[in-house]
């Protein structure tokens, strides 16, 4: 059984102390924040000085900077995995 400390809170008001994390990441979430700028400021606030902050959102395939990376990963996935992930073909950015 995996263990973790899970919270359901607003991205703009994270329930953590300043400089709490060695790394901060957000996957397909920032675009849902009421204020993306405030959410990014919160990510910076909870990150230790110099800690990496990684944010990933999906967009149109032709605008996706990770397109080559996703294509390489998609080539390694069985077709059924790509379908469950919602991609139109393996390794393509989602365009919804």
Image (cartoon, grey):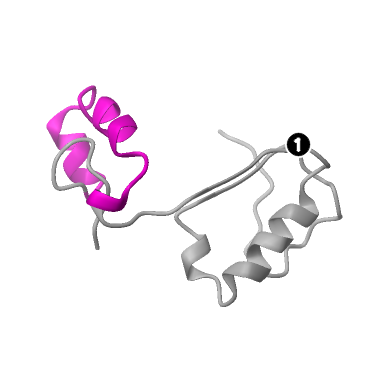
Residue 80 belongs to magenta span? yes
In percent of the image, x 22 and y 45: which residue is there? 84
Q: Quadrant of residue 17?
A: bottom right
Is 18 situated above or below 51? below
All told, the count of numbered labels is 1
> Which region is colored magenta?
62-86
In percent of the image, x 77 and y 62: which residue is there? 15
Residue 14 in the image: state x and y as whole percent. 73, 63
Q: Mark 1 points at which residue?
A: 22
Which secondary structure dominates the residues rendered in magenta? helix
Which is more toward the observer, 27 or 62?
Answer: 62
Q: In this view, does 40 lie to the left or right of 74?
A: right
Is 63 situated above or below 39? above
Which is more toward the observer, 15 or 89?
Answer: 89
Q: Is residue 63 left or right of residue 7?
A: left
10 Å crowding of disc 1: few (<14), some (14-19), many (20+): few
Is 1 situated above or below 25? above
In percent of the image, x 86 and y 54: which residue is there? 18
């Amino acid at each position: 059984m995996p263990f973790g400390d899970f919270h359901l809170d607003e991205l703009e008001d994270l329930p953590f102390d300043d400089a709490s994390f060695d790394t901060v990441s957000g996957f397909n979430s920032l675009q849902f924040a009421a204020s993306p700028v405030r959410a990014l400021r919160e990510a910076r606030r909870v990150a230790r000085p110099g800690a990496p902050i990684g944010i990933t959102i999906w967009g149109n395939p032709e605008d996706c900077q990770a397109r080559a990376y996703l294509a390489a990963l998609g080539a390694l996935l069985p077709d059924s995995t790509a379908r469950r992930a919602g991609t139109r073909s393996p390794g393509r950015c989602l365009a919804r």
